[in-house]
Amino acid sequence: MGELPQRAHAGEAEGAGGACGAVRRLLRGAACLLPAVLLGVGGLPGRVLAQGTAPERAVAARGAAPASAAAAPVATSAAVLQPCRLTGFEHDAACGQVRRPLDPAAPRGRQIEVHFAVLPALARHKHPDPVVVFAGGPGQSAIDLAGSWSRLLARLGNRRDIVLVDQRGTGRSAPLACPEMPPTTPLAEALSAERQTARLEACRVALQRLPHGDLRHYTTWVAMADVEAVRQALGAPRVNLVGASYGTRAALEYQRQFPNAVRRLVIDGVAPPDMALPEAFAADSQAVLDRVFAACEADAAGCAALHGPVRAHWRGLLASLPREVQVAHPVTGTTERLRLTREMVLGLGRAPLYVPVYASALPAALAEAARGRFEALVGLASALQGGRGGALAEGMHHSVVCSEDLPRMAGSASVSGEPIAAGSDFGTTFADRYRRACAGWPRGEVPGAFYRVPEAPSPALVLSGGADPVTPPRHGERVRAALGTRARHVVVAEAGHGVMALPCMRDVLFRFIDAPDAAAALAVATDCAASVPRPGAFWPPGAASAAGGARAP
């Protein structure tokens, strides 16, 4: 979670990772938990997911909503679908909406419309179980990402409908969007934590004036009852769930409430419900940053020779702050003066870690910064900003994080009791950002059962990138253990945040969902994950001749 100035990502560099960059072209933000040059978040280190009590498991097995009867959707009439055209999707789609109470405890109170789109299967005789997509962020619109999802799930789309639901607060469904900052915004404003906090506060006040502006009712557990209403309206007996980044939390919650409706579950870059998002960023980001440094140091004839002692460059840069610098704006090219702070540099340095291809250029950017030139560092972080399809509804984003995650944070220590600043350059920087943003944000009630992951009722595929700075394998493994024997965890060691976009993993995804039975799904071969290479160090143009004719890797 988190974001670059109002943007999110999903997927990864094509052929190298699974989340941003070419990801912007592939999943264009379909899953985020994006770094945060402006806002950052993290997760709860090492906390074990509870399995739930026997009575809770029994309730889940009956398919009842365990949190509140008010959260369960009433019987929904068949959906009335209208032909529609969606950006990036070359065929006709079908669009519809279901009316839902804003407050689930007041079913006859104010109503909102939850919009969804169906990308129809190409085959005349299709399977009855569609694929339901859960976008990331939180705050991304699944419908706005129709083109990206249709390409990623193209093989599945031959015989199955793809269903995109704009979760309440996003896209067309009672949107809670803040005014976007244009890409030409001066860096001093775009990178200023104080200005962004003030901007979010003004946005909150404006959102609360909207007819649907009770910000307490946009939590994940409430929104999943909306998705169930969509399933009922479509008449689908069961569905296949695909979630990425924050979408993994949403998919897990849907399965918790409606286990009998789930045929397959695929979660990529797992953000567990008990993961206090802003907290884990320090440890998880530091681990990937150290990995980048270690790889450069081990490449004595390449990266280390070309870029010098990158770890020392980083530490020296942090020690020099705050300082006045001049830097060319990455979009306008205008030279600007700004006071560069530690918080700004931590955000800039963390952003490229989401995508290994971009992270491979971080040593070069730090070497430039050591010489007083910051264009590479700013430009590298700015490259992760998505297009319109990747924009976050920041109001929904904070309604989720402030309600579900912030209450579980305890000062400067995680819920597990471990200081989150220990051994990390990032300390409590991103957690403190969210504390400030959430200080006045209304918080919805979240039932205790939300934070537990019951055993999987059907086959589940858990995917992680070994170089993911926000949802690394340790979170995926905890969830895999909670899901039990019907779950598999596949780690792509050299991938970053999101692995579904990798060519070999697309095939794994297809075969897992398309498998005729549970045994076949859990037996799908995933050997290709081990063959994904780590990107070599970035060599700027002309670096080979400057290094005496050595060739770039």
Image (cartoon, grey):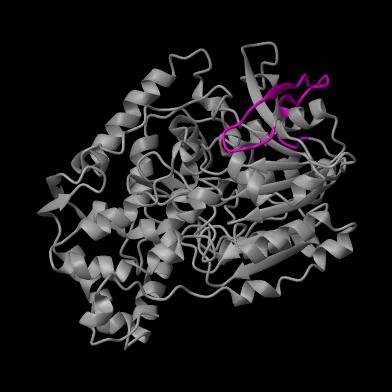
- The residue lying at 64 percent from left, 11 percent from top is 109
All told, the count of numbered labels is 0
Reply above or below: 300 against 354. Answer: below
Left or right: residue 156 compared with residue 192: right
Q: Quadrant of residue 387?
A: top left
Q: Quadrant of residue 543?
A: bottom left
Magenta span main SS: loop
Q: Is residue 71 magenta?
A: yes
- Location of the C terminus by quadrant is bottom left
Q: Position of residue 252 (x, y in %)?
A: 68, 47
Left or right: residue 524 compared with residue 191: right
- The residue lying at 39 percent from left, 65 percent from top is 359
Residues 182 and 435: in front is 182
Kindly tell me whether residue 211 is visible in this rendering: yes
Q: Position of residue 153 (x, y in %)?
A: 69, 49
Reply above or below: 281 against 537. Answer: above
Residues 528 and 294: in front is 528
Q: Position of residue 33 (x, y in %)?
A: 48, 49
The magenta stretch is: 65-91
Reply above or below: 285 against 407. Answer: below
Q: Position of residue 56 (x, y in %)?
A: 78, 45
- The residue lying at 61 percent from left, 19 percent from top is 102
Q: Is residue 366 magenta?
A: no
Residues 280 and 517: in front is 517
Residues 97 and 150: in front is 150
Left or right: residue 440 compared with residue 260: left
Kindly tell me whether residue 309 is visible in this rendering: no
- The residue lying at 79 percent from left, 46 percent from top is 158
